[in-house]
Structure formats: structure tokens, C-alpha cells
Image (tube, rainbow, N blue to C red):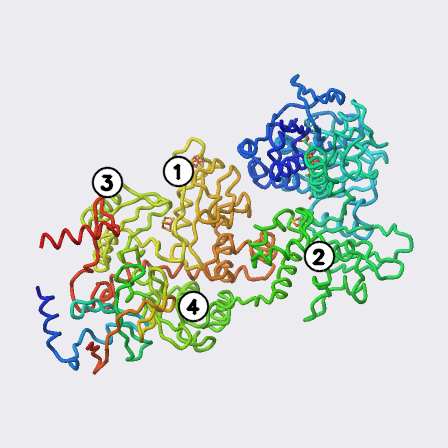
Amino acid sequence: MSKKRIIVVGNGMVGHNFINTLATSENSSEFELVTFSEEPRLAYDRVQLSKYFSGYTAADLALTTADDYERQGVVFTLNDKVVAINSHEKTITTASGRKEGYDKLVLATGSYPFVPPIPGKDQDHCLVYRTIEDLEAISASAAVSKTGVVVGGGLLGLEAANALKQAGLETHVVEFAPRLMAVQLDEGGGQLLRRKIEDLGVTVHTEKNTKEIVVGQECRYRMNFADGSFLETDMILFSAGIRPQDELARQFGLDLGERGGIVINDYCQTSDEDIYAIGECALWDNKIFGLVAPGYQMAKVSAAHIVSSLITHEEPALAFKGADMSTKLKLLGVDVASIGDAHGHTAGSQSYVFNDDIAEVYKRLIVSADGKKLLGAVLVGEAEAYGTLLQLMLNDMDIPGNPAALILPAVDGEASVGLGVAALPETAQICSCFDVTKGDLAAAVQGGCCTMGDIKDATKASTGCGGCSALVKQVMDAELVALGVEVNNNLCEHFAYTRAELADIIRVKGYTTFAQVLQGHGKGHGCEICKPTVGSVLASFHNEYILKDEHIGLQDTNDIFLGNMQKDGTYSIVPRIAGGEITPDKLIVLGEIAKEYDLYTKITGGQRIDLFGAQLHELPQIWERLVAAGFETGHAYGKSLRTVKSCVGSTWCRYGVLDSVSMAIALENRYKGLRAPHKIKFAVSGCTRECAEAQSKDIGVIATEKGWNLYVCGNGGMRPRHADLFATELDDETLIKTIDRVLMFYVRTADRLQRTSVWMENLEGGLDYLREVVVDDKLGICSELEDAMTRVVSTYQCEWKTTLENPEKLKRFQHFINADEDDSNLLYVRERGQRRPATATERIELVNLSSVQN
Amino acid sequence: MTLLNTLNNAQEQSQDKWNTVCLLDDIAPDTGVCALYQGEQVALFRIGDSDQVFAISNYDPLGEANVLSRGIVGSVGERLVVASPLYKQHYDLATGECLEDSDLLLKTYRVRVVEQQVLLG
Ligand SMILES: Cc1cc2nc3c(=O)[nH]c(=O)nc-3n(C[C@H](O)[C@H](O)[C@H](O)COP(=O)(O)OP(=O)(O)OC[C@H]3O[C@@H](n4cnc5c(N)ncnc54)[C@H](O)[C@@H]3O)c2cc1C
Ligand code: SF4
Ligand code: SF4
Ligand code: FES
């Protein structure tokens, strides 16, 4: 049987989601998937588009890659618009003249920005905000402008205003309606939002109807308003709403709504049963859905319908039933949420309002006439209740107790009234971005997930907008408790605390030895888990010599002899080569030593040199030579800063914009020796080509023309994770200050052996929370964190240097306490000119050989 | 050939003969050292800063290397143990039993401390 041919017009967010759904379904082999995009690239995350201004690249925003599509067998053509449909022949034609046949056609053409018909709107520097190309044009225009105006004070308009402000423009928002975000907010909410935004330096003009755009006197243009007033500006960004892209459907006779939009039924079929429409171009029940979640739902429904009508011939299992348009977002740093009937249009509805002018918080609840059901809500300035309120409304649940309690601030000590997640039905949708229900989460927990990281991997919940993360965590915890999984975070049998709790105890009580901690808060004799953990915490706070008598017994395998133990009990030696920069003279020293001691020599992934096979008694001899040549310990053995990898940067590279090597060396020297819950790796790239692969490191720094961009919590290794962009365009000083804070906060709060990536995934509130703590100083601990880091930096010592100066300590560096012999168990063979431990079979041969010779 | 001699001597000597292998102070509190005793590698562990010392074979049978003296000393329940520095299995310091695999039994040695000297016998 030949494959069924599905053509998808438009490769935007929803079109891609549709393709992905079919390509990963069990029937994928039955289909040939073909897609055309008018844009010059494959689908990207339009929702996160504004991040383009904070350093995200097109690649960061991409939802798929050419490789992925090729692997999935998806045929795609970019830069080619579909211009004609022949529904009798079942073909389409593209602008470049290609004609292709289909079995089913899916229109996912999205929408376009509406630009009001104002005379003068088509000039240069009059722009819109929808695609990556639009953003490039905005950047270019902002670079030659001083003032910018956004026409439209809705959700997108305010996002655009934020972008202009960040670009350093004097920013204005011009709105036709009497208030901002008129669709989502009521009067009170709109007013507060306006005040907050004006406090941030964005000027808001409401009830302004732009009559014309003419040449300005002070600025490039002057906007004349209907009321006779005017505003001068260098650039104008139109964000006055969207219109469904229904051009094709219009020309080729599909049914349209009165005000546009391609009419679809519950299966997303248009008036031609072999043509579907999904996403922002589709009109269902006379409504356009301008959010991505309903689009994804349509993608799912239409894919299921196509499978059932072409392949299985069963009744379609899914139908589109409309979608909730509630939203929660941060606009210019202000939390805003709108749920359900935010305006109280429902007959007989009543409302509760909470207004705090001091803290600048506004909340309004709309409840049913009998006061039992929640119909809608508006939250501005603080939106923590969003998840709870949304669930109450979506699941048509009775309001627990007095409705007012839902929006009143928590009185000291009392937890604010939430609804127990236990009350939610299994079908309650917890994450709308990925349509994950409470039942899905429960199943994941039953399948073994017990951390947020697991849950995200297994269900994708909370990996989109992130608005659901608090609720997802609550559901997970409740489910764990229900399963009788005792959420036991004890470090080990000796301490009934987590690492973070122990760190707090040690800090507050000022403990300096393991004995004190064990006596005060533990039991038994300690073990290989708690001893190194406490040792590491003590070292992070006090930074004493780790081989001091009271600390020596705490040190892990590697730390205790300041080297990395290999499989045969010998050690490898890794001197610090900060930033990967080394002089020829030092390189020669390493070569000479390696040759003399016959050490197997290898370059590491962190731009250093690793010398293998040193026996205990050789370690001090070798280090004596290394220290004399100016080397320091590389802490390759410690749970501490390893390396700061760097590319050569602006000093040599043709593309470099900043001196990445100098920065890498400065960072490595600053944080060397910092003991942490796990090893920490950095990298610094000299430009956005990113040759140092900084985005796979715990701390990644990338130079841009305007300063350093800081990425945090990336990881290579077993579970790779792309680092998150944390702050942009920093100068040297701010960069270091920010890293100080992030690292110290990690050191204090992470679990044992938790890399920054997992720490971040389990941090409640995620990246935003980390930003609040580290940048906005929400917990008021930033100066404390900096002081702690300063202390560590100022007490740094090369542990090998200290050890060499200490004959007592050197006594331990011999295999036998009572004899000068070597360990007779060591056996080597030579390979490619170097030595390596003999394998088990080789050992047998070697031993036989030597006994024969004897 | 010195090695062989010690071995023969030792075998000739009676069970009650004790040999000094090091000073108590040679073993930092809660750590181990390795002593060569009658041609065998013996791991000695000192509990805290007391004069309680244990002696078991230094050979890690799972890691196949002479490294146990370099492990961390601790407790599992009531038992004092050392964790192998290679793969972290626990060995009971008193009995030599591997807690993860009770079929594995390390050789143990009689040990005592007299006037700051550590003796094996
Ligand atoms: C700045 C911004 C912020 C947003 N923030 C949010 C948010 O926080 N939450 C949220 O839920 N939603 C948000 N949205 C809306 C969200 O991006 C859209 O709902 C979603 O992108 C719709 O997906 P789509 O596939 O229907 O349309 P699109 O993503 O627009 O894709 C349509 C694609 O089809 C192409 N196309 C059109 N006609 C043709 C043709 N004839 N031939 C070939 N190709 C064609 C277009 O070029 C386009 O690439 C935001 C949108 C923007 C612009
Ligand atoms: S990241 Fe940039 S500066 Fe560094 S080597 Fe690559 S191209 Fe050159
Ligand atoms: S990847 Fe595995 S084999 Fe290679 S160094 Fe790491 S732990 Fe050893
Ligand atoms: S609701 Fe957006 S990630 Fe879950």
C-alpha cells in the first residue's frame, strides 16, 4: 500500500506540532509528510520570541532542525509560499511553481499582525512583531533611534515595549481603549498595571486614536492623534492585534467567518473534508484562539482524525471542544494573570476585590450568583494563586470556604488557602502547554518519577511556559505520599537532614569540625557519604587545609591523597593550567617529569594535561618539581572547580570581540579551590560562535559586542543539559559578582552530588526564582553570599604546596608505613609508546613469564 | 630475599609473638595505613583519636587492588566498617565480611596497642 500524503501549509508552532505528532505516532510509517514554509527557517518558539533581544539566537529558539526532519522522513521546503489549492485535483501550487498532490491538506498558516489603516504607516521604521526577521528589523531600527512607540497596549504590545526599553529607547505605548490589556483585565487591574509600567519608565497614552504619521520636528516622525494631541518618535511598532492568515482559504472557496478565520468543525475539518485548519488561522465556534496551547490541541485532534479516516477507519477518539484562554505572564517584570470571565459578563455574577496600594497588588474574583463557583479572576502584581484558581474554575469545583480567603494575603504563619490537590479530578489539566493531566502525573510517579527533574523528562510538564510548576510539584508530592513513598531526604543513616539543611546548621552554629556536627546532630560513626559531605560544607565555609588532622578522615578517595585514584590504586596528576593557557617552558617541565616517572600522558577535555600511574610515594616528589616550576594543584580530585575552558578570543581570533582567555584565567583563579556539592566546570567563548562550548557548562560565559552573556546550569556528561541564559551584556565586575552569588547559593542549597543542572531542575520556581534571589536579592542574602565567596577566595591555598611544607603529612605518602617497598601488585604493558595497567589476561601471562625467568 | 626470611621466622615463632609495625601516631584519627607484615599487605585503621585499631587485608577483592587502607572509616548500624575507595563496598573491620556480599571474607589480623606502639600478631 502506498503511503498517504499529508501536506502541511505553514511550518509554525502548530504546524510543526502536528508533524511531530504524526511522525512520532505508531502509524508514522503510513504517511509521507510534506511541509512548506513561507519563512526562511523551520519552526521556532514564537512564544519565547522576545528572548531574541536578550541574547537567544535563532538556534536557541528552534523547535526542530533539518536533521531531525530528515531523520523523521519529513520533506520540507523553506521560503516557498503555497499560493493555490485545487481541491478537485487535490493539489497545491507554490510561489516557485511547484505542484504537489495530497491525500489530506492541513492549513497551519497562523496569523499576521494587524496594522490599522493609518496614512503614513508604510514608511521605514514602521514595523511589526511576529517573526525573527521582524525582530532583526527592530534591532536595526532601534540602533538608529532614540524614541520608540508601540501602538497597542495588549499583551504583545507590552512585550514589545519591554523590548524597546531594553534596547535603550525612550518608550511609549499608545492604546486606543481606555486601559491596558483591555481583553484580559478589568478596570482596576488595568489601572495598577499602568501605574507599575509607568514606574518603570514607559509612558502610557490611552484613548488615543492615531490619525496620521507625518514627518517630525524633533524626531523622525510625528503621530497626530484624533483629539488634536501628538507624539514625536523615531520608530513605530504596530501591535494592534492579529488577523487569521486565511488568504488561501478565501481565494479557493473554503468557508470563512464574518471577520475572517477558516471555519472548522470539532475535528478541525474545514468545509472541504480533506482540508483541515489548525492553530491561529482556524475559527471554531466563531472564535480564534490566539494562544499556542489550543493550537496544539487542534494538532492532536486533527492528527487523530486523519489517522482514523485514512488508516484505522474507527470512530475518531478526539474532538476539539474549545479551550480556556486564561493566561499568566510577566510583563515588564509585573506578574499578570487573567482567568475565565475576567470582566464578570456572566449574568448575576458577583465579585470580590482586594486592592493593596502600598504593595501594589490587585486581585479580583468573579464568582457565580450563589457564591459557590469561581467564574473568573484578575491578578496583577502577584499571581501565585493562579494555579489554584484556574483549577477551581476549570473543574467547576465548589469554592472551599469563604471566597475572599482565596485572594486575601496569608496572615503570618498561616498558609494561604489553597485547594488540596487531592480534590482535583484525575482529568484536571495541570500543564496546559503540554496537555498533562493530574492522572498523567500520577502515572509518572507510579512509574518511578520522584523529582521534578524526572517528571519533566517523563511528561514534559512544566517545560513550556513554566506557569504550572508549583502545581505540578504539589501533585507529585501528594502522589508520592499517597503511594506511601516516604519522602526521605536524609543524607544517610547518620544524619536525618539533607545536605542543604546540614549546610544551614553548620553555618548558623559555626561548627568547624565533623565531630561537632556528628555530636550535635547525628549518630553513629559517620560514613563515606556524610563525612565527605560535611567535609565539603566545612571547606566551603572555612576553607581550611583539608588534610588537617580533624578533616583528614573526611576526605574522599581522591582528596585524601590529592590525586585521582585509578583502577590499580595508583594516581593521576593534573596540575592547574588556568584557561588552558600554558607556556612552552612549563610544557617542557611536564614532559620531563612524565618521562622521568614514566607517566602515561593524556590531554583532558578541560584543556589540561593528565599524568597517570604515579605511586603514592612518587606524588610528593613529582609535586615538588611541579611547584618549583610554578604549577599549582588542579583540584581534579575534588568536588570543586575543575577548569575554565576558553577559546583564544579577541587576542588572536579574527572573530573574537572580547578577551576570553584573560577572563577565563581570572575566573579560574578566583574560584579555584572552592569546595562544592559536586564538580563545577566553566567555559568562556570570545564571541557567539561559541568555540569553547560554554553552553554545556555549569557556568558559561559568551562575549558579545555589548559585554558578557552569562549562562548557568548546563551540563555535558551523562545527562546533557543546555545552560540557561541568565543575564546579558554584563561588564567584568557585574559578571563576577553574579557568578559569586550563583555559586555560593548553589553551594549552600544543593544536595550532595547534585550538579547545577539537576539543582536547577529541582529548584522550585526554576530560573526565575534563581534570578529573583541572585539579581533582585529577594531573600536579602546577596551581600552575605558575596562575603562568603570573598572569604573563600582570600583563604585559597595550593594544597600541594602546604602538604610539601609539612613533613608530618608527607609520611602518609608511601605504600607501607613500615617498609620502603612498592606495591608488588602493579603490572604494566606498553602501548603506543606509553605504559598502561595490564589487563587480567595479560597479568596471567606476565606473572607466568616472570616466574619462568626467575 | 629478606622477605622470605621474615616469613619463615614468623612461622617459626609462636602465636603469642607480637611484632610492632608502626606507632599509633602514624595513623591519623579515623584513617588507615598499610603495613607490610610477614609478606602480606595489612590495612590498619584507627577509630577516632582513640587507641582502638583494627587490621584487615589491604587487598580489595572486587577492585583487585591493594587500596583498602585508603578508604573512609565509618559505621553501618552498629558495625564499624571501611568503604573501599574504588567502588565503595563496605567491609566489617572486626570480621572482614563484605556487607554487600557476605560470601566475601577478608583476612583479619590480631592487633593491639601497647605504649603507643601498634603490634600485629
Ligand atoms: C511575540 C509573541 C509572543 C507570544 N506569546 C505567547 C504566549 O506567551 N503564550 C501563548 O500561548 N501564545 C503566545 N503567542 C502566540 C503564539 O505564538 C501563537 O499562538 C502560535 O505561534 C500559533 O501557531 P501557528 O502555527 O498557528 O502560527 P504561526 O506560528 O504563526 O505559524 C504559521 C506559519 O505559516 C506560514 N505561512 C502562512 N501562510 C503560508 C503559506 N501560504 N505558505 C507557506 N507558509 C505559510 C507563516 O509564515 C508562519 O511561519 C505569542 C506570539 C508572539 C508573536
Ligand atoms: S568563539 Fe569566537 S572568538 Fe572564540 S575562537 Fe570561536 S570564533 Fe574565535
Ligand atoms: S567516561 Fe567513563 S571511562 Fe571515561 S573517564 Fe569517565 S568514568 Fe572513566
Ligand atoms: S502550563 Fe506551560 S509549561 Fe505547563
The residue at which mark 1 appears reads as A648
Pointer 3 local density, CA inside 10 Å: few below 14, some 14–19, many at least 20:
few
Pointer 2 local density, CA inside 10 Å: few below 14, some 14–19, many at least 20:
some
Q: Separation of disc 3 and disc 2 at Cα?
A: 62 Å
Q: Quadrant of residue A384?
A: bottom right
Q: Which of the marked residues, 1 or 4, is nearer the chain's N terminus?
A: 4
Q: Separation of disc 1 and disc 4 at Cα?
A: 41 Å
Tell me the amino acid under the disc marked 4: Cys
- Camera-nearest residue between A621 and A259: A259
Residue A753, position in %: x, y?
Answer: 45, 59
**Residue depth check, mark 3 versus mark 2: number of the one nearer the observer:** 2
Establish whether ligand 2 lies closer than 8 Å to the Cβ of label 1.
yes
Quadrant assignment for the C terminus of chain A: bottom left
Q: Quadrant of residue A86?
A: top right
The residue at which mark 2 appears reads as A426
Q: Which of the marked residues, 2 or 1, is nearer the chain's N terminus?
A: 2
Q: Is residue A233 visible?
A: no
- Camera-nearest residue between A319 and A610: A319
**Residue depth check, mark 1 versus mark 3: number of the one nearer the observer:** 3
Q: Which of the marked residues, 3 or 2, is nearer the chain's N terminus?
A: 2
In the drawing, what numbered circle is on residue A416? none
**Numbered disc 2: what chain?**
A
Tell me the amino acid under the disc marked 1: Val
- Camera-nearest residue between A226 and A117: A117
The residue at which mark 4 appears reads as A530
Quadrant assignment for the N terminus of chain A: top right
Position of A346 with respect to A519 (left or right) is right
Q: Quadrant of residue A102?
A: top right
